[in-house]
Amino acid sequence: MKKFAITIAGGGSTFTPGIVSMLLDYYEEFPISVIKLYDNFQERQDPIGEACKIMLQERHPEVTFSYTTDPKEAFSNIDFVMAHIRVGLYAMREQDEKIPLKYGVVGQETCGPGGMAYGMRSIGGVLEILDYMEKYSPDAWMLNYSNPAAIVAEATRRLRPNSKIINICDMPVSIENTFAGILGLESRKELIVRYFGLNHFGWWTSITDKAGNDLMPQLKEWVAEHGYESSTEDFQHRAPSWKETFRKVKDVYAVVPDMLPNTYLKYYLYPDYVVEHSNKEYTRANEVMDSREKEVFETAAEIIKNGTAEGYEFHAGAHASFIVDLARAIAYNTQERMLLIVPNNGALVNFPADAMVEVPCLVGSNGPEPLVMGEIPTFQKGMMEQQVAAEKLVVDAWEEKSYQKLWQALTLSATVPSAGIAKEILDDLIEANKEYWPELS
Ligand code: NAD
Ligand code: G6P
Ligand code: MN
């Protein structure tokens, strides 16, 4: 049986050890011969690499493991790249969140002006990794978590139309875990869903079990009262700010009560509420630096100090299982049904063909085949048209180095109240991102 070779790009990511651990959990169903880590920041990757090396030696010593900052070494002779880079690191996420908040506007990693600023940093980094992969392993697939996925996906659609890259998000699978919990089911994999939208911007229209029983009524009854708050364990979204987001779904749901919403819609439907409930001095970036980032690097340091990974665990939930399932679906042509970010091309029949949308796809060795979700209603379509235009304008701005296009993008975001405020935020973002953005004129 063929064994697969995998490179994790953004090797120093807080999510790397969880994905490595999940690859080892799956070893029987998805045998691997090689895992390599790649990062452009050696000091950050080294401790993660060393800790993973110890973990691998103990669990699967037959897997060849290495970590490097050399692209040729990293991307040669591989079958898959699993990418999750953060250009600008947490220091820049903090700026993305705090600058808009100064002007009374939502400050969020992937939504609104902060998400656009992050997009302007990410596009170049993601294209660079894709180009390395194609240079050194032209047959490989890149499975990309790097955010903001909507903007990155539009950039790869437009600038690398023939590349084997699939952009993905873990929010729907995390929410589907919550659904399974509410329904008293073992696993989200018992659910068959219909869903449409953009990344971090969509709705479930149908949820059944494998026998075809409609599970929406039971879920709606729960959500109308509790939002997505439930006793289901969701390690990745366990922080108080995430719990609040899950509760707020109650109000997001009330706007479109025939469907179940993605949590991220709160930023577009209730921006005033979000701003009122934000701490301008201590945002989610600070929370993550003080929790996940700290914990992952402390655990790595302890593993290295003790020379063993026994007794330590790196969390590997839906986030890790989803990307490993995707690699496996391509490797073994499993035709698994998965929600992915793909060119619309008629999947949403009354929406532009060249929009990147998030819809269920069947996945096999030729990649994703999107399923037709049909016509979408006027309200959702209106919201999505505004949002997709804003995302496209960010990519225009990056390509053309255009201040005007980026100003238009910010202005168009439903999180921003006026062109004047958009301009003030933009001018601050330009100053903060000097090192990372193309120079705009
Ligand atoms: P992190 O800062 O801990 O890790 C990112 C790593 O990427 C860092 O080690 C950094 O040095 C590296 N990096 C930055 N630019 C690079 C480049 N050009 N080449 C190689 N490496 C580079 O961040 P994190 O919190 O672990 O998140 C990683 C990424 O995954 C982020 O983009 C985050 O938004 C994304 N993410 C996406 C989803 C999703 O649903 N799509 C879910 C979780 C995380
Ligand atoms: C969800 C989203 C990701 C996002 C993450 C942020 O899982 O799908 O796109 O990156 O949340 O989580 P954090 O813990 O970093 O705020
Ligand atoms: Mn996501």
Image (cartoon, helix red, strand yellow):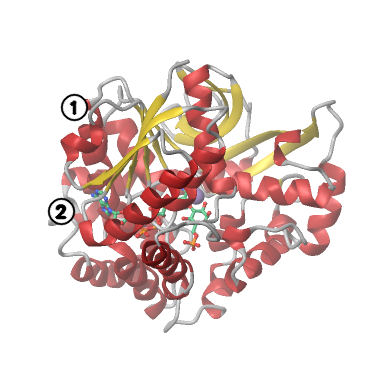
Question: What amino acid does circle 1 point to?
Answer: Lys
Cα separation between marks 1 and 2: 24 Å
Q: Which mark is residue 236?
A: none
User: At 56% from the left edge and 56% from the top edge, which residue is drawn?
Assistant: 264
**Image height of 164 relative to 252, above or below:** above
Q: Position of residue 249 (x, y in %)?
A: 69, 60
The disc placed on residue 135 is 1
Judge left or right: residue 135 versus residue 168: left
Q: Position of residue 349 (x, y in %)?
A: 56, 25
Indicate the position of residue 257 as horizontal and vertical percent values: 76, 50
| For residue 367, above or below residue 285 | above
Q: Which residue is mark 2?
A: 438
Q: Residues within 10 Å of mark 2 (few under 14, many from 20)?
A: some
Location of residue 137 (image quadrant): top left
Q: Is residue 186 left or right of residue 162?
A: right
Instruction: Write the residue at 38% across / 72% down.
Output: 100
For discs 1 and 2, the disc positioned in front in the rendered view: 1
Quadrant containing the C terminus is bottom left
Q: Find numbered disc 2 in the image and state the secondary structure of the residue it sits on.
A: loop
Q: Residues within 10 Å of mark 1 (few under 14, many from 20)?
A: some
Q: Amino acid at mark 2?
A: Pro
- x then y, percent, for residue 270: 59, 66
What residue is shown at x 22% (from left), y 29% (from top)?
76
Mark 1 lies on a secondary structure that is: helix
- Asked which quadrant contains residue 172, the reply is top right
